[in-house]
Amino acid sequence: MSGFFSQKYKELVPYVPGEQPQGRSYIKLNTNESPFPPSPRAVAAAAEAAKKLQLYSDPEMRLLKKKLSEVYGVPENAIFVCNGSDEVLNFAFMAFCDQGAVFPDVTYGFYEVFAQLNGVKYRKIPLKSDFTVDPADYTGTNETAFLANPNAPTGVFLPVKEIEKILSSNERRLVVVDEAYIDFGGESCLPLIKKYCNLLVTRTFSKSRSMAGARLGYAFASPALIADLETVKYSTNPYNVNAMTAAAGIGALEDGDYTEKNCLTIASNRAFAAEELEKLSFTVLPSRANFLFARHATVGGEELYLRLKEKGILVRHFGAERIKDFLRITVGSKEEMRALTEALKEILK
Ligand SMILES: *Cc1c(COP(=O)(O)O)cnc(C)c1O
């Protein structure tokens, strides 16, 4: 730390992203990227937009919002567009947490980092022993609630009617539902934004639309909440989404069939991999995401992570006490899932 770093950040522990190896080529099952390339329409649109990079991108993101509005049936003033959904999550911690924040003890690690970064007081609420959320733990609270649904890194889905209980219990408290993985089989809270002004739904092009490297996220909420987010955006970086990424996003939305087909393939590969892991004495949590969270009956998570890495397969291991026996495994192609189970068979033999 230099002598210049603000005192307010001296305790800050940054988020640790999954490894992105540059040398040896691994089967990468550690960051929930898609095994499929982006839609050719997204790639072509980005290349076309590159010819006009002398111009700033449209800060109002009109074309992309228009397309999102058509695809999701939501008015444009209820849509926010951002540089990955991490950005809108950070904005939500900046803008909407005067009463503090609550989130599960096992969830997306960035929530805690964003809370620290923004000086937001926060509490972690333990998930039940089966890693589900008990809505009753949230109905009596005033803090802004952050719920990833399906949750990460567990993949467990909380039914929309349970989220509605939390929303309706205290309409003066905001609930942020992070739907990064919703396209892989969960049911979205999106229809509830018309009914509840205290709901913010965040989404990303990173996972289901194979655009993690493009950095494109979006959010849905009442126009008043969106206006607040725009105030924060125009006070930090009005050009938060670059022109190539915005164009790629439109291309991807125009090729919805491609995304749908890929998500169905992932769901099928997920079922295959879960069954194979269970045969190898893993307990696999029920996942509606593009990853599995699994624990072996006898061998610890760290050991399996290291042994798989030696064999050229990267998965994610978290050291936190409650989940240290688990591996988070991205669901990739069928071949990748076969390579994973073959490697595990050898390791466990
Ligand atoms: C991947 C992920 C995000 C953020 O994705 P971006 O690439 O920033 O859009 C947000 N929430 C969860 C739970 C995620 O796993």
Image (cartoon, rainbow, N blue to C red):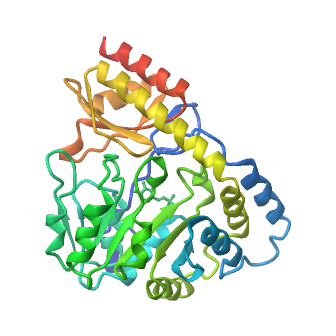
Decide which of 12, 77 is in the foreground and name it.
Answer: 77
Decide which of 38, 188 is in the foreground and name it.
Answer: 188
Where, quadrant-wise, is the N terminus in this rendering?
bottom left
In the drawing, does residue 226 fall left or right of residue 151? right
Which residue: 43% across, 17% down? Answer: 342
Where, quadrant-wise, is the C terminus in this rendering?
top left
Residue 2: in sight, yes or no?
A: no
Residue 196: image location, x then y, percent: 35, 79
Residue 87: image location, x then y, percent: 49, 70
Q: Against 345, is 225 above or below?
A: below
Query: Furthest-top residue in view?
Result: 349
In the drawing, does residue 222 fall left or right of residue 159? right
Which residue: 66% across, 74% down? Answer: 66
Q: Against 13, is 186 above or below?
A: above
Residue 30: image location, x then y, percent: 45, 40
Residue 8: in sight, yes or no?
A: yes
Choose top left, top right, bottom left or bottom right for residue 65: bottom right
Choose top left, top right, bottom left or bottom right for residue 328: top left
Q: How many marks?
A: 0
In the drawing, does residue 200 fall left or right of residue 28? left
Query: Furthest-right residue in view?
Result: 51
Which residue: 35% across, 73% down? Answer: 117
In the drawing, does residue 314 fall left or right of residue 125? right
Residue 255: image location, x then y, percent: 69, 53
